[in-house]
Image (cartoon, helix red, strand yellow):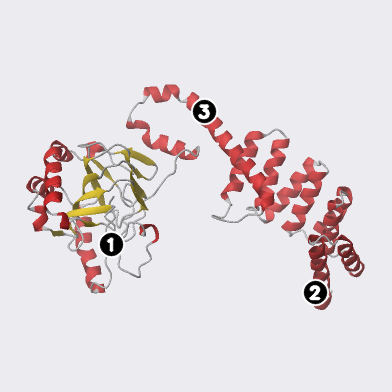
């Protein structure tokens, strides 16, 4: 067939489809009849005529045409999908399954084929297998995509089937693990429990995603084991004194409290739009980007003495950083990640009203006054204060304990060199909540 004839056939089929969509059935039939007279065995013509027959409830006739079409053009997922739909109308389940498999062989992420395959499994009573296929279908949904209204009900069925199956599977596994969990209480099961929960759809597995320096092969935990940082005991014991110093400093030097987020004009703010230059999240810095703020630190001698003994990260121009973090009433710090996993972040809660919580990755905790924790701020984290009072905590950084002394020296030397190269044209800032 010449290129001009091919174009003519495609044009007639398209016009017929447009006429049918506009409700002009007679006109559509005339256009299809002309196309069929010119090229009766063209796959496009066979497909269009089959759809017309299917709409007229002549599924048997549509099947015959589509089988001829797929024999001529076996690599077309559209033809196989239409054939599967026709076979479904005829309740020929084995043949429908073969047609759907032909679609998925060509296009494994074909959403409609996956949904129809799951529905076929439901009709066959294979509910668990159907839920697995529904799960696969939901994985191929593009984010924020506007899908045809015809897919709304199938997708709702998919979501519900996956939800019900996940819960049934979780219940089944929980029943089998009663004795194992009783025999191994505590943190011995934490990693495996997290992996199992992720597999069952209850939790996600988050990874370190620094915005600047990523040191590979370091252990990455959302929250680190408290016993790995015995020097925090002295901070916790001094909570009352640190809190008193914080409160006095804030009263006497209100001007020293600055918005933690302070981007200049013209910078894309994304999640920081609401907090930029806002006192909703503010800081009273004791150390900032490796520089001791003498006027502030001198007001807080007990806090300063403890910080001086801590194994803080020290990178000229960048670390240590230590500050009192004030999160105002009814405020939210959105999900974000820090600059480097070579350091970890310490929180010592000082003033914590009810309804204040903190999420790192898949784990959410509530602050408890005087109970410190250490976390990896390069794993996505966020914070809430849903109370009617401000929340105050002491925040400072510490080296990742898995770094060798040589690695620390390398980072301590290389990062200022990067700053020197750019001559202060760019800055690297931390993100601690």
Q: Which residue is mark 2?
A: 7
Check the image and report above or below for 397 versus 163: below
State the residue at coordinates (68%, 56%): 106
User: Seen in the image, is 398 located left or right of residue 63?
Assistant: left
Q: Dot 1 surroundings within 10 Å: few (below 14), some, or many (20 or more)?
A: few
Q: Position of residue 94 (x, y in %)?
A: 78, 41
- Cα distance between the residues tagged 1 and 2: 60 Å
Q: Dot 2 surroundings within 10 Å: few (below 14), some, or many (20 or more)?
A: few
The mark nearer the N terminus, 3 or 2, is 2
The mark nearer the N terminus, 1 or 2, is 2
Q: Position of residue 267 (x, y in %)?
A: 35, 68
- Cα distance between the residues tagged 3 and 1: 48 Å
Q: Nearer the viewer, residue 234 or 106?
A: 234
Which numbered disc covers residue 171? 3
User: Seen in the image, is 376 located left or right of residue 242?
Assistant: right
State the residue at coordinates (17%, 55%): 285
Badge 3 marks a residue whose secondary structure is helix
State the residue at coordinates (38%, 66%): 268
Badge 1 marks a residue whose secondary structure is loop
Which numbered disc covers residue 133? none
Which label sits in the foreground, 1 or 2? 1
Q: Which residue is mark 1?
A: 262
Q: Nearer the viewer, residue 19 or 154?
A: 19
Is residue 382 visible from the viewing direction of this image? yes
- Cα distance between the residues tagged 3 and 2: 59 Å
Badge 2 marks a residue whose secondary structure is helix
User: Seen in the image, is 115 located left or right of residue 183?
Assistant: right
User: Seen in the image, is 407 located left or right of residue 249?
Assistant: right
State the residue at coordinates (17%, 59%): 290
Do callouts 3 and 2 mark residues in contact (Cβ within 8 Å)? Answer: no
Which label sits in the foreground, 3 or 1? 1
């Amino acid at each position: 067939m010449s290129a001009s004839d091919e174009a003519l056939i495609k044009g007639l089929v398209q016009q017929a489809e447009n006429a049918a969509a506009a409700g002009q059935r007679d006109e559509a039939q005339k256009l299809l009849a002309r196309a069929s007279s010119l090229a009766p065995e063209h796959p496009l013509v066979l497909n269009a005529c089959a759809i017309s027959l299917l709409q007229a409830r002549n599924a048997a006739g549509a099947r015959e045409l589509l089988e001829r079409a797929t024999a001529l053009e076996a690599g077309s997922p559209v033809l196989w999908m239409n054939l599967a739909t026709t076979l479904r109308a005829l309740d020929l389940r084995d043949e429908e399954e073969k047609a759907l498999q032909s679609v998925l062989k060509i296009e494994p992420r074909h959403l409609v084929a996956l949904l129809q395959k799951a529905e076929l499994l439901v009709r066959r009573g294979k509910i668990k297998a159907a839920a697995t296929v529904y799960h696969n279908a939901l994985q191929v949904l593009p984010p924020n995509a506007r899908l045809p209204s015809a897919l709304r009900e199938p997708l709702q069925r998919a979501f519900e089937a996956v939800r019900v199956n996940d819960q049934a599977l979780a219940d089944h596994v929980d029943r089998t693990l009663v004795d194992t969990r009783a025999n191994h209480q505590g943190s011995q099961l934490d990693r495996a429990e997290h992996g199992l929960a992720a597999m069952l759809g209850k939790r996600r597995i988050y990874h370190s995603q620094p915005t600047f320096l990523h040191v590979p092969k370091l252990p990455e935990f959302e929250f680190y084991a408290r016993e790995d940082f015995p020097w925090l005991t002295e901070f916790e014991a001094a909570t009352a004194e640190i809190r008193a110093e914080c409160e006095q400093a804030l009263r006497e030097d209100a001007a020293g409290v600055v918005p933690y987020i302070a981007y200049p004009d013209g910078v894309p703010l994304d999640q920081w739009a609401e907090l930029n230059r806002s006192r909703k999240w503010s800081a009273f810095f004791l150390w900032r980007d490796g520089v001791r703020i003498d006027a502030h630190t001198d007001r807080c001698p007990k806090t300063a003495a403890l910080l001086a003994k801590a194994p803080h990260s020290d990178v000229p121009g960048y670390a240590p950083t230590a500050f009192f973090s004030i999160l105002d009433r009814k405020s939210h710090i959105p999900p974000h990640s820090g600059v480097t996993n070579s350091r970890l972040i310490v929180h010592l809660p000082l003033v914590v009203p009810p309804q204040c919580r903190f999420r790192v990755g898949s784990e959410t905790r509530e602050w408890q006054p005087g109970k410190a924790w250490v976390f990896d701020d390069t794993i996505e984290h966020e914070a809430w204060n849903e109370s009617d009072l401000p929340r105050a905590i002491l925040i400072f950084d510490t080296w990742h304990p898995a770094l060798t002394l040589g690695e620390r020296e390398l980072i301590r030397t290389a990062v200022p060199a990067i700053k020197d190269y750019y001559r202060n044209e760019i800055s690297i800032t931390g993100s601690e909540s």
